[in-house]
Amino acid sequence: MTEEAAMQPVISLRSLRKSFGTLEVLKGISLDARKGEVIAILGSSGSGKSTMLRCINMLEIPTAGEVVVTGETVKLKKQGNGLAIADGRQIDGIRARAAMVFQSFNLWSHMTILENLIEAPVHVQGRPRAECVVEARALLEKVGIADKSDAYPGHLSGGQQQRAAIARALAMHPQVMLFDEPTSALDPERVGEVLAVMRALAKEGRTMLLVTHEIAFARDVATRIVFLHEGVIEEDGPTEEVFRNPKSERFRKFISNTQHALLE
């Protein structure tokens, strides 16, 4: 890979807008994420964090703007007052390269954990089943649940299910990982085991965008902080710089309020 190619953004959002009816949730977001960056997306509830993340792999269709994933512009077409997906096959490829880990795990309940991991690599990517099984077992080992390969999701704790969901995303060989509040549905005692897996992925140099309310984790792991407020980026910069000397008064208050809540 040339130096120029290495500097190309893995994800580019350009003037991204998203409305739900008359409510404009994203108001012209522009953002580049480069290879190896771990970007923590912070903000109060309703600020547009999850919507922005879901627009990257078209789980939400933008109202306007452009999304570029690994150099490929997502093809959208005009439909009514907004946009619609123009090429469904392209979206399958985009979702493989930008794999999402959801709040609520989204594992298929009628499949074993192993079957969950190999489903998309075999049936979407067309890879050999035997190869996918070997890799899936290695990934379950990596996230610490190798003994759960033949279990069904309903028999696992929330933390185990979320680690299985991370392994499932990794099975697609993604170029970027998208985490949407991955610990918000977990009991407090299960949060640490999921954060430990995410911390290990960050140390591997994986490109990650994570929406999180775990401020201490974001400060420790993220290379960059993006703070949203009412659908616009209020703060964006290297983690330590942003926390030490925030330019946005709203971000300053957000951090202060969050720290006070943790102390209560």
Image (cartoon, grey):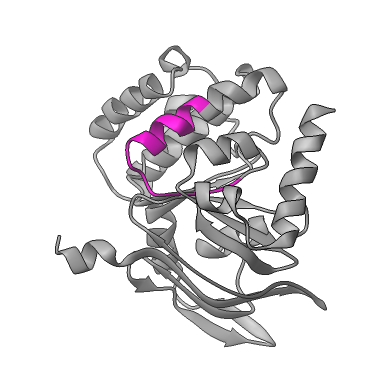
Task: Describe residue 1's horizontal placement relative to residue 76 as left or right.
Answer: left
Residue at 37 percent of width and 55 percent of height? 97
98 part of magenta stretch:
no
Residue 56 position within the rendered picture, expressed as x and y whole percent measured from the top left: 51, 63
Decide if residue 19 is on the left or right side of residue 59: right
Q: Nearer the viewer, residue 224 or 17?
A: 224
Q: Is residue 206 magenta?
A: yes
Based on the displayed image, in which of its 4 quarters is residue 51 positioned? bottom right
Which of the pair 79/254 is nearer the observer? 254
- Residue 125 lies, in percent from the top left, at 32, 50
Give 9 or 119, whichever is nearer the viewer. 9
The quarter holding residue 202 reads top left
Q: Position of residue 68 (x, y in %)?
A: 42, 71
Left or right for 201, reference 166: left
Query: Which residue corresponds to the image point at 59% horizontal and 48% vertical from the top-left?
Result: 243
Residue that protrudes farthest toward the top in the picture: 147
Residue 118 visible somewhere in the drawing: no
Q: Which residues are magenta?
A: 196-211
Q: Quadrant of the N terminus?
A: bottom left
Quarter of the image with the C terminus in it:
top right
User: In the current view of this chain or complex, which residue is farthest to the front?
Assistant: 245
For the point 41% across and 16% down, which residue is it?
146
Residue 131 appears anywhere in the view = yes
